[in-house]
């Protein structure tokens, strides 16, 4: 083997470290062979950036897949499609309430925020309040792309949105610009990763679900918060706000829903009853975060008691279901 | 039952395998040739697609060779893959026939 080829092979094998060990054991040699064949055909002895990005990107995907116990393709597509709905709804709420909301004040185009860390200033970003509007608009564009069946464009826009949700908070901090709570970016990053887990909108049914479900849920969300639009939206990003529903409450509610759903879907089947138990127990907390002004006192207590009874029943039902499906695998005990 | 529409790279990979078992780079070269340069699969993308197609039962491994110290793994189309490819080809053909027919109506309308 020529020395240059050996050096190239070593570089390729270093790139493959991003794949999980089990995948490398089965496929590394074959993939390296293909990469070397391609390099020979093009007469080169270096790794191309696009080629490296393709290997690293798919390696990360394979690693995430291994962590979820290797969900089937159809399940990953369902996760990705659901994540598109959730992420777009979240982005639209942030866009309408956090970015454009401050403008919905009769007779005023000056943003007068309030609370700690904010001061009076003119809005420098056109109609938008913070740079995070870029991330929200990317999600809206990705939603349009997947609804129209432009899968490659959709995935590209989601990847840019994920990168933006990581970079924009950092840049805002460096440039001392106003920004929403970090949990907003965390939710969008997590949702973006889930949206890339499979092929969102792969079938016409899923595209219809996304195309209709997203505006309906976003519309309902905005309608539920319509009282906050005129003027009160200036408090939306403020961590010390006292309004009924703000970016913090919404983001934590979405984050808990995402984490609980991911834990239930990603858990190995014989142990799924544990995340189901936790997910059901979290329901009153999520509801309280989403409806803080309307779900208090006796209603909250009643809801909590109901879910304390429902959660073990849901867990027992899940355990029994998977015990029937996987009789050869001993289920995890319900008691320590 | 909802028909799952197939992306062009996937269709081309299955079409290439319909002609017989092929190894990784041969698939990259043939899909590029079949698409007249439009579809240029990278190795990482190809193997992710093959993983998915194997998961769906449309493709399977078909042996390995070691040539000049380099492993070449061959892939082949399964019976289920052939059925799926045929269904997709028929769908595309029906769409193309309809488009050509409508274009013919349009041309005849322009000349009258």
Image (cartoon, rainbow, N blue to C red):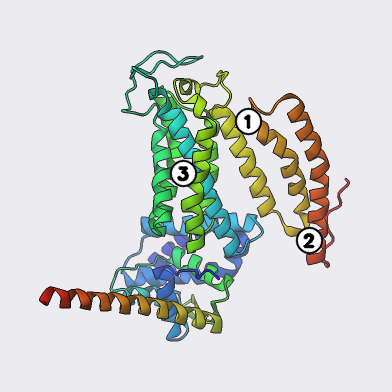
Task: Tell me the SS state at disc 2.
Answer: helix
Q: Residues within 10 Å of mark 2 (few under 14, many from 20)?
A: some
Q: Which residue is mark 3?
A: A162
Q: Which residue is mark 1?
A: A291
Residue that lies at the very extreme toward the left in this rendered image: B111
Q: Residue at x 63, y 30 (%)?
A: A291
Q: Quadrant of the C terminus of chain A?
A: top right
Q: Which residue is mark 2?
A: A322
- Residue A258 coordinates in the image, percent (x, y): 61, 44
Q: Quadrant of residue A249 in the image?
A: top right
Task: Tell me the SS state at disc 1.
Answer: loop
Q: Are marks 3 and 1 on the same chain?
A: yes
Task: Tell me the SS state at disc 3.
Answer: helix
Relative to A275, does residue B106 appear above or below in the rendering?
Answer: below
- Chain for disc number 3: A
Q: Residue at x 48, y 20 (%)?
A: A232
Q: Nearer the viewer, residue A75 or A213?
A: A213
- Residue A74 coordinates in the image, percent (x, y): 58, 64
Mark 3 or mark 2: which comes first in sequence?
A: 3
Relative to A63, does residue A219 appear above or below in the rendering?
Answer: above
Relative to A301, does residue B71 appear above or below in the rendering?
Answer: below
Relative to A320, is A205 on the left or the right?
left
Q: Residue at x 48, y 76 (%)?
A: B69
Relative to A55, is A224 on the left or the right?
right
Distance between mark 2 and mark 1 Cα atoms: 34 Å
Q: Quadrant of residue A138 in the image?
A: top left
């Amino acid at each position: 083997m020529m020395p240059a080829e050996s050096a190239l092979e070593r570089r390729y094998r270093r790139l493959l470290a991003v794949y999980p060990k089990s995948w490398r054991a089965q496929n590394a040699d074959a993939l390296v062979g293909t990469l070397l064949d391609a390099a020979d055909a093009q007469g080169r002895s270096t790794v191309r950036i696009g080629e490296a990005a393709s290997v690293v990107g798919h390696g990360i995907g394979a690693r995430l897949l291994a962590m979820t116990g290797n969900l089937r393709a159809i399940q990953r597509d369902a996760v990705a499609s659901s994540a598109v709905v959730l992420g777009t709804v979240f982005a639209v709420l942030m866009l309408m309430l956090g970015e454009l909301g401050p403008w919905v004040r009769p007779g005023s185009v000056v943003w007068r925020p309030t609370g700690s860390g904010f001061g009076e200033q003119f809005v420098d970003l056109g109609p938008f309040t913070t740079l995070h509007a870029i991330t929200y608009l990317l999600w809206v564009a990705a939603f349009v792309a997947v609804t129209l069946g432009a899968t490659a464009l959709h995935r590209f826009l989601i990847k840019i949105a994920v990168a933006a949700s990581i970079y924009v908070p950092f840049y805002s901090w460096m440039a001392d610009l106003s920004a929403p709570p970090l949990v907003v970016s965390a939710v969008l990053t997590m949702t973006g990763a889930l949206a890339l887990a499979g092929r969102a909108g792969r079938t016409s049914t899923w595209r219809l679900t996304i195309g209709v479900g997203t505006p309906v849920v976003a519309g309902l969300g905005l309608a539920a918060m319509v009282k906050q639009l005129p003027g009160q939206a200036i408090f939306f990003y403020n961590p010390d706000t006292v309004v009924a529903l703000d970016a913090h409450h919404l983001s934590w509610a979405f984050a808990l829903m995402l984490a609980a759903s991911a834990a239930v879907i990603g858990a190995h089947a014989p142990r799924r009853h544990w995340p189901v138990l936790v997910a059901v127990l979290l329901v009153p907390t999520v509801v309280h975060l989403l409806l803080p002004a309307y779900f208090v006192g006796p209603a909250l207590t009643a809801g909590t008691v109901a879910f304390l009874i429902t959660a073990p029943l849901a867990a027992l039902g899940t355990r029994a279901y998977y015990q029937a499906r996987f009789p050869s695998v001993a289920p995890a005990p319900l008691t320590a | 039952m909802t028909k799952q529409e197939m992306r062009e790279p996937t269709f081309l990979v299955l079409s290439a395998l319909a002609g017989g078992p092929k190894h990784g780079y041969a698939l990259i070269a043939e899909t590029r040739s079949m698409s007249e340069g439009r579809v240029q699969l990278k190795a990482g993308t190809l193997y992710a697609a093959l993983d998915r197609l194997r998961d769906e039962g449309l493709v399977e491994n078909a042996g390995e060779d070691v040539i000049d110290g380099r492993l070449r793994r061959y892939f082949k189309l399964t019976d289920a893959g052939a059925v799926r490819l045929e269904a997709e080809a028929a769908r595309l053909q029906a769409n193309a026939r309809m488009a050509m027919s409508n274009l013919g109506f349009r041309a005849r309308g322009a000349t009258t």
